[in-house]
Image: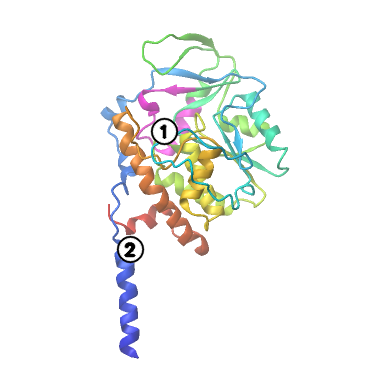
Amino acid sequence: MKKRILFIIAFVLLAFASCSYKHYTYLRAAEEREAFSPAQQAEYDAFIWRAERKDRDALPSSFRTCQSELRVRSAVSGYDPDFKPSTKGLADLKVSASSDFSAKELDALVAEIRKLHSGPITIVDLRSETHGLLNGDHLSLYGQENWDNMGLTHEQIIENEKQIIHGLVGKEIETGGTSRGGRTTKMQVSTAETEEELCARKGVGYLRLTVLDHCFADPRSIDTFVSFVKDMPEDTWLHIHCQAGMGRTNMFLVFYDFMRNTDVPVKDVVYRHFMQGGNFQLYDGMKENEAEWKIPLAKEKVEMIPLVHEYIKEQKPKGYKVPWSQWKTRFKS
């Protein structure tokens, strides 16, 4: 009997060790991206204020809620249009998403949410890039790949943003698109506020996560998000956005769905949020003429998003006592 017990214990330990040393190519890629030197950062310095959302009485682009219909999307590498995902728990998520928004567009999206929900609303802002409301319009500083703040800490990004946005009042700036040397327009700034200040003025909550565009999220952002969701009141409605409401937004919609519906498979969760709008989070980067630098970023998400699900499924019953940033160190990269 003792030998049998010892055998079982040895087997369990071996299985745990095998799991603990599983290899992941992109396990520490997010941290490595943030370790840029000043010389490397200079390559991505912003060169223009990008005008993104005009102050108008309308919903921001790509607005959708957890109750939006699922529709078959255009072909994307890795996407099976014949797959019908489970909708278990989807309509009860209390979540919506969109692009960023102007001051009046925030009013419109809050009014739309109020048709479904009477409790508190919190905006989850995923942008690492410097952005704010100028004359009610939404603008951001744009550099190559939208990585102007690459390598800065969360605290540095927030503090720099406040100083930059507040310092624009009474000044004239140039606004334009994403190409150097392109057509620009002059803008005289009469009012300026951060998105956090706008949300406070409108009476909605605000959570800022500084996630790099196009990329799988950094460990701190995931830790903060999980902790926030774990502790927030049950009747809170989240509205999640990045710049376009497509990539980072869908990634965190998937994470949120994982936390609320841990028994729904990864594929079903990813598909249903893709079919409501936004980008396909299991896209493998194999699109014809895809930019070379985007391919490993896509492959990283394909590898890491299911691992986040594994983390949440294991840690939710334990109250997330071990943060994602620590939990994932059990694996080999």
Residue designated by label 1:
213
Point 72% across, 37% down: residue: 114
> CB of mark 2 within 8 Å of CB of mark 1?
no
Q: Place residue 136 in its image quadrant.
A: top right
The reply to whether residue 225 is visible in this rendering is: no
Q: Which callout, 2 or 1, points to the residue nearer the camera?
A: 2
Nearer-N-terminus badge (2/1): 2
Q: Give the quarter of the image for residue 202.
A: top right
Classed neighbour count for the residue bearing mark 2: other residues with Cα under 10 Å, few (<14), some (14–19), many (≥20) = few
Q: Where is 307 relative to 190, above or below?
A: below
Helix, strand or loop under label 1 = loop
Mark 1 closeness class: few <14, some 14–19, many ≥20 residues within 10 Å: some
**Residue drawn 34% across and 38% down?**
297
For the residue pair 280 and 95, the one nearer the viewer reads as: 280
Q: Is residue 263 magenta?
A: no
Magenta segment boundaries in residue numbering: 140-163
| Residue at numbered disc 2 | 19
Q: Is residue 67 above or below residue 8?
A: above
Q: Residue at x 52, y 47 (%)?
A: 84
Q: Does 172 sit left or right of 305 as displayed?
A: right
Q: Dot 2: what SS?
A: helix
